[in-house]
Image: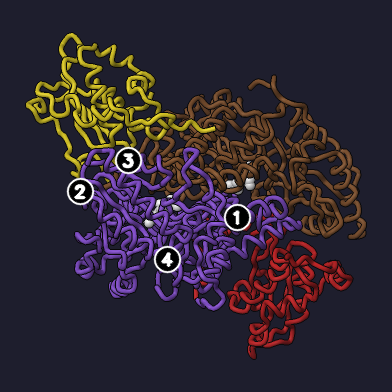
Chain colours: A red, B purple, C brown, D yellow
């Protein structure tokens, strides 16, 4: 009845991405950036992209806090999208991300895996202001207050509205 | 919805699935349960689902990554998808689990209503509404100043839809109407009401508590914005209900209850709500009940809606036929062909409570009172009525037992 | 509460009553269920009560006068009286059945809060609150302009009560505080807080979700105004909870949800609310779940609170002892003597989710994340923690299994 | 487990009160009056009392709509309280009312039986204004709107506050 993970999800290639992530850090020439939480656990992923005028993702960096799955997935995704066009990245669907990850995940862990993918999809449409560009695309460090985001008057997110 | 893989409805067969229908009342009368508009009984499949979830898969949902929590979450979310399919909703995210119709409507009134209505705005209701679709709007009116207007009932138990265009105006923000009256069984023409509401630029909320258990529901065909109903009136567990809301609307609505699970981020300074449907499901939901509701849906879908409706019509016709012969008894509302399986009636000189009490002495369970529809009763000049309401497990024999017992009531009170 | 007629607590014996504790995880590991702060399992007595109510006595409550409805009503109201006695409340009317702690607190925020707070007023919370006792007040602040203030947490996981007098003022309308933190297990001195609140003229709401299942509750001795908790955290069904409110307060509060059962009279022009507790129980309540909660209370009352508390302390001490030996692991919060049976911890370099996932591979169910207490986690500079929480059916052997599995996690991540 | 009615509740003496009630109607010299619904069923009872300066209930009348139980109980109660002092009527508790009724009732039917008793207890403290006295203590007829009572802004009843 239940689709439990038949195989161990912490396979060697995943642990390697976790322990030695690809492009974890700051993108020196970032043109786009986005950040999001997994509301179920408080994890977050911050992504910075350098997209050139031809619409090609030249560089992709991530930072964040989270479990092995979310961090390894982010690392794999950065590798994957560099050199791709915005259109190609757009067409990289949730299923593709799960396939790239390569290990079967239960629904709750899929959310961990898909967090960086969601952030990248948003980042494609989140150009930085000129003033943000000089190396300071606002980034949170673990446990730091996301002071700008929450507000006492709840403001429903509108980005999902069709 | 396809009816290809359904089995024919055989009430005697169905009754085998309902343990409670085999009990005796007052130690000698077989139970004749005709209080289905208030709540329905559960088949053993639903009861068994409650036992099985509790004995094998129970944990809190969503926030855990251990096996039980994964299993609970999977069962809970698959119940959501079952409801989605059952209603033909476009997205599972449009299905919000609540405690029942009442909470569903209050959610809309507090979330959508507080944010979108004010003085000069109007909400259009009908004179036949259940208190669950009246009081939340009275409360909203007191908070925001929105005005309530009412489509009146005609003498024949139908809505006076000639008033519809007159009552609608650009000020109308919402039309909130029952798909089936819980007293008269009246089934207003939803398509016409939705169309008129759309022309006036108003949203539409359908109180489908009495509809969903008995007739096929297609929220996309209805083109409704909100649809509310309860699990316990459709063979499901008590303590769970549904609010369907159109995605674009839900996504723009602020949260209702605040707490765990409905947030994206909380600080001491404020919070950011989660996406739908989580945004509207604060706290631990009625997990086991929602899973049981999914099983109730599976159970109902064994049968075709045509069969269910035909069966209920047969019983309703028989009830009308038999009850109309009882001196002093008057049935409220439309003819059987124009309503659901609900028969409410009054005796000229016997109070509804006394009727229900004496019927119970014969094992017949009906409801007596205002059925949470005081304005409707006032409209017809009666304080209380007696109501028999049918479901797929009722039989013609039971309708005969009702009629015979009623005749004894009449004789007892020397009418 | 007398402990005269209790039986000694024998966890092995207790486990016989919980079918789910005998299942295997991943087909070979016996389940070690240590996620009790999220939700608890149900004994067969509670499951059996659900079956029996459904198979023999189920109908809608209050408004019916047939046998089933009388029986349902009697069972439902007797569950209310059981809760009353369990909490030592003065009146059964002070017990309101809700869906859970979350709805209970939202009810107070919307009903009492909207009517009694405004700009210039303050509500005093603490930094350790569950989102259920934070977000409703953030929402209230957005509606009425009331200001929120927070008693800070000290480094040792205790509230900094030296700030209490400074934070209280004549502007303080309400102090809302957890009786036990769901992350740290911290048990603040309620008497002292209530006394200080009273001197300032403020009301007190106690979020007792983690307290009521584990320690004796006496709302009159506490002198609390509101107490909220959930059935599913105390061996009861999901989908039911309780709001206790002092009678004089409840009687002066406007209704929250509107609908059937909570009114005295409804017209097209308005409505008049019913008396308590009906006023706050709109619509069909979670009937079967509330009755099951009564059975869970019967079950718990077999044992003495001293036994339950001593048992949980024994497990907590053992957990501290064993876990403190694991390199890189840090336990959050107070020493076992100063808290409830909750042990939250972090690994220096292993994320909580990975810990929980790998523990589950050994059959050990714990929770990982922010446990709906993001501000608390931020206070201690961690994004997520892993939490083991105990109840009367857990054993020392299970704590050993937790510790052994944790050591394997550590080795797996080469720490 | 359940206390079902062992005996038929519609005994002869109850039917007699129902069919030929005592003092159903209007109290010519009413000094006190009160009216209440049973919110579960919409029934109501209206009571008018003439209480003399010595605090004795000289006359008691009721009117209303409801089941056999509620109407018969009201009739019995009117008989019972005439000639009693206000203090004596006050001391006539719910238990006494149920005993006066004489037939065992299930909890829901007890509410029907106790409705008139509740109304009487309130009526003792609801003196009529002088202008109301001339034979027109406001009374509802069945199905008529209780236009003064409901209001869109719910006003919690305060009378029960200790
Ligand atoms: C301290 C505390 N308050 C409130 C809640 C919310 O309870 P529920 O989800 O049952 O509404 C919980 C449990 O999650 C809790 O631990
Ligand atoms: C038409 C209608 N609306 C709303 C309700 C309220 O449903 P619930 O009590 O399950 O919230 C009912 C049932 O009582 C009903 O018949």
Q: Is residue B311 positioned above or below B368 on the image?
A: below
| Mark nearer the viewer, 1 or 4 | 4
Q: Is residue B410 or residue D93 the one in the foreground?
A: B410
Q: CA distance from mark 2 to mark 1?
A: 42 Å
Query: For residue C186, which numbered disc appears in the image?
Result: none
| Mark nearer the viewer, 3 or 4 | 4
Q: Is residue C120 visible?
A: no
Question: Mark 3: few, some, or many residues within 10 Å (few <14, many ≥20)?
Answer: many
Q: Earlier in the sequence, mark 3 or mark 4?
A: 4
Q: Quadrant of residue B178?
A: bottom left
Discs 2, 4 touching: Cβ within 8 Å: no
Rendered-image quadrant of the N terminus of chain D: top right
Residue that mark 3 sits on: B353
Q: Earlier in the sequence, mark 1 or mark 3?
A: 1
Discs 1, 4 touching: Cβ within 8 Å: no
Residue that mark 2 sits on: B381
Q: Is residue C105 or residue B285 the one in the foreground?
A: B285
| Mark nearer the viewer, 2 or 1 | 1
- Residues tagged by mark 2 and mark 1 found on one chain of the structure: yes
Q: Residue A68 appears at what percent x and percent y? A: 80, 64
Q: CA distance from mark 1 to mark 4?
A: 22 Å
Q: Is residue B241 visible?
A: yes
| Label 1 residue SS | helix
| Mark nearer the viewer, 2 or 3 | 3
Question: Mark 1: few, some, or many residues within 10 Å (few <14, many ≥20)?
Answer: some
Please state the chain letter of the residue tagged with numbered disc 1 in the rendered image: B
Residue that mark 4 sits on: B311
Please state the chain letter of the residue tagged with numbered disc 2 in the rendered image: B
Please state the chain letter of the residue tagged with numbered disc 3 in the rendered image: B
| Label 4 residue SS | helix
Q: CA distance from mark 2 to mark 4?
A: 32 Å
């Amino acid at each position: 009845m239940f689709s439990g993970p038949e195989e161990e999800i912490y396979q060697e290639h995943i642990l390697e991405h976790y322990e030695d992530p690809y492009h974890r850090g700051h993108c020196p020439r970032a043109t786009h950036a986005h950040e999001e939480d997994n509301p179920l656990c408080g994890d977050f992923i911050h992504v910075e992209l350098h997209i050139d005028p031809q619409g090609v993702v030249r560089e992709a960096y991530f930072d964040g806090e989270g479990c092995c799955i979310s961090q390894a997935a982010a690392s794999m995704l950065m590798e994957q999208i560099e050199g791709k066009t915005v259109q190609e990245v757009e067409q990289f669907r949730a299923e593709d991300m799960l396939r790239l990850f390569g290990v079967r995940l239960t629904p709750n862990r899929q959310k961990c895996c898909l967090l960086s993918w969601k952030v990248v999809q948003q980042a494609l449409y989140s150009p930085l202001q000129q003033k943000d560009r000089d190396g300071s695309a606002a980034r949170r460090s673990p446990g730091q207050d996301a002071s700008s985001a929450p507000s006492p008057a709840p403001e429903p997110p509108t980005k999902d509205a069709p | 919805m396809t009816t290809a893989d359904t089995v024919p409805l055989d009430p005697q067969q169905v009754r085998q699935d309902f343990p409670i229908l085999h009990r005796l009342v007052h130690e000698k009368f077989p139970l004749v349960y005709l209080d289905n508009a208030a709540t329905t009984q559960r088949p053993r499949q639903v009861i068994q689902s409650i036992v099985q979830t509790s004995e094998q898969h129970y944990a809190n949902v969503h926030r855990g990554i251990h096996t039980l929590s994964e299993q609970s979450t999977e069962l809970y979310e698959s119940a959501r998808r079952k409801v989605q399919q059952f209603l033909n909703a476009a997205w599972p995210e449009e299905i919000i689990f609540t405690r029942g119709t009442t909470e569903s409507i209050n959610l809309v009134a507090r979330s959508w209503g507080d944010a979108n209505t004010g003085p000069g705005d109007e909400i259009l209701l009908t004179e036949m509404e259940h208190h669950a679709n009246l009081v939340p709007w009275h409360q909203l009116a007191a908070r925001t100043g929105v005005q309530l207007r009412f489509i009146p009932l005609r003498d024949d138990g139908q809505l006076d839809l000639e008033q519809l265009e007159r009552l609608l105006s650009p000020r109308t923000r919402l039309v909130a109407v029952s798909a089936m009256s819980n007293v008269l069984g009246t089934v207003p023409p939803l398509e016409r009401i939705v169309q008129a509401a759309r022309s006036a630029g108003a949203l539409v909320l359908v109180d489908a508590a009495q509809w969903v258990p008995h007739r096929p529901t297609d929220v996309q065909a209805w083109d409704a914005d909100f649809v509310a109903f309860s699990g316990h009136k459709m063979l499901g567990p008590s303590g769970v209900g549904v609010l369907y809301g159109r995605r674009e609307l839900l996504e723009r609505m602020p949260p209702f209850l605040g707490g765990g699970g409905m947030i994206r981020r909380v600080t001491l300074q404020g919070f950011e709500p989660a996406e739908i449907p989580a945004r509207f499901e604060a706290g631990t939901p009625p997990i086991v009940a929602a899973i049981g509701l999914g099983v109730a849906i599976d159970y109902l879908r064994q049968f075709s809606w045509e069969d269910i409706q035909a069966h209920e019509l047969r019983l309703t016709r028989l009830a009308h036929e038999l009850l109309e012969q009882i001196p002093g008894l008057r049935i409220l509302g439309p003819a059987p062909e124009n309503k659901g399986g609900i028969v409410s009636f009054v005796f000229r000189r016997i109070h509804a409570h006394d009727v229900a009490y004496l019927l119970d002495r014969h094992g017949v369970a009906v409801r007596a009172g205002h059925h949470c529809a005081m304005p409707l009763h006032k409209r017809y000049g009666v304080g209380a009525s007696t109501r028999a309401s049918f479901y797929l497990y009722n039989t013609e024999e039971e309708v005969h037992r009702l009629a015979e017992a009623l005749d004894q009531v009449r004789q007892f009170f020397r009418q």
